[in-house]
Image (cartoon, coloured by chain):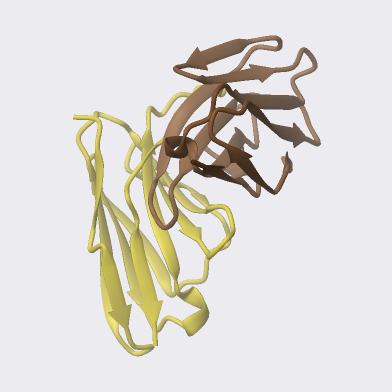
Chain colours: A yellow, B brown
Amino acid sequence: DTEVTQTPKHLVMGMTNKKSLKCEQHMGHRAMYWYKQKAKKPPELMFVYSYEKLSINESVPSRFSPECPNSSLLNLHLHALQPEDSALYLCASSQAETGGWNEQFFGPGTRLTVL
Amino acid sequence: SQELEQSPQSLIVQEGKNLTINCTSSKTLYGLYWYKQKYGEGLIFLMMLQKGGEEKSHEKITAKLDEKKQQSSLHITASQPSHAGIYLCGADRFMYGQNFVFGPGTRLSVLP
């Protein structure tokens, strides 16, 4: 199984809502990533988990809260978002190797709209 | 930190034509990755290059990393409509990997 799955595919939420994005992989990868992608822009790294521990937080606002319950699952909890947070949120996973070998497998993304 | 530039920004070619996309880094590349993205979808891994002078091919797509490891090119031979999409180069910001940055992307259209 070389697939990364993400749910939901689409999400519309108000600024006072609390919602969660889910990502799952069964490739035995120990590094998982969240990216944010605005229209016509490349993906931007948000968070990296390595061996279920948060290893990189790219100065993301606290209204985004990541969670890695186990090595196969990655969640992104959303609270009090702003309309400018509307974007495609991509999850990826890779072997947790160092030294540059870092092929990442991406999920199809969740398209988030904040009203 | 690592910054990547890509050229051209967009490209429209007739089916059957060859094309090249370039990715240039301001710093030495520890690993250079090529991905393809269809609009609004996830990224598909194409190739990874690590050694200077390395060249890899997959079907009609060839990627090369120059000797100085600061530039990579992606070449598509005899383009097809299925090649259309956004091509993104990506790189590890640091030698230990995981902190990843993408280039701005090259939007490719292939006219039948």
- Residue B17, position as x, y percentages in the image: 61, 28
- Left or right: B110, with B93 as reference point: left
Q: Relative to B20, is B99 above or below?
A: below
As drawn, A108 above or below B20: below
- Depth check: give the residue in front, B27 or B7: B7
| Quarter-of-image position of residue B21 | top right
Specify the quadrant of the image occupied by residue B6: top right
The residue at 56%/29% (across/down) is B33
**Residue that lies at the very extreme toward the front in this rendered image:** B112
Is residue B29 shown to the viewer in this render?
Answer: no
As rendered, which of A14 and B54 lies closer to the eye?
Answer: B54
Q: Let me know if residue A18 appears in the view.
A: yes
Residue in view at x 47 percent, y 28 percent: B46
Q: Which image quadrant is residue B53 in? A: top right
The percent coordinates of residue B50 (x first, y second) are: 61, 17
- Give me the residue at 52% from left, 14% from top: B57
Please give the name of the residue rendered at 63% of the width and 26% of the height, measured from the top-left corner: B18
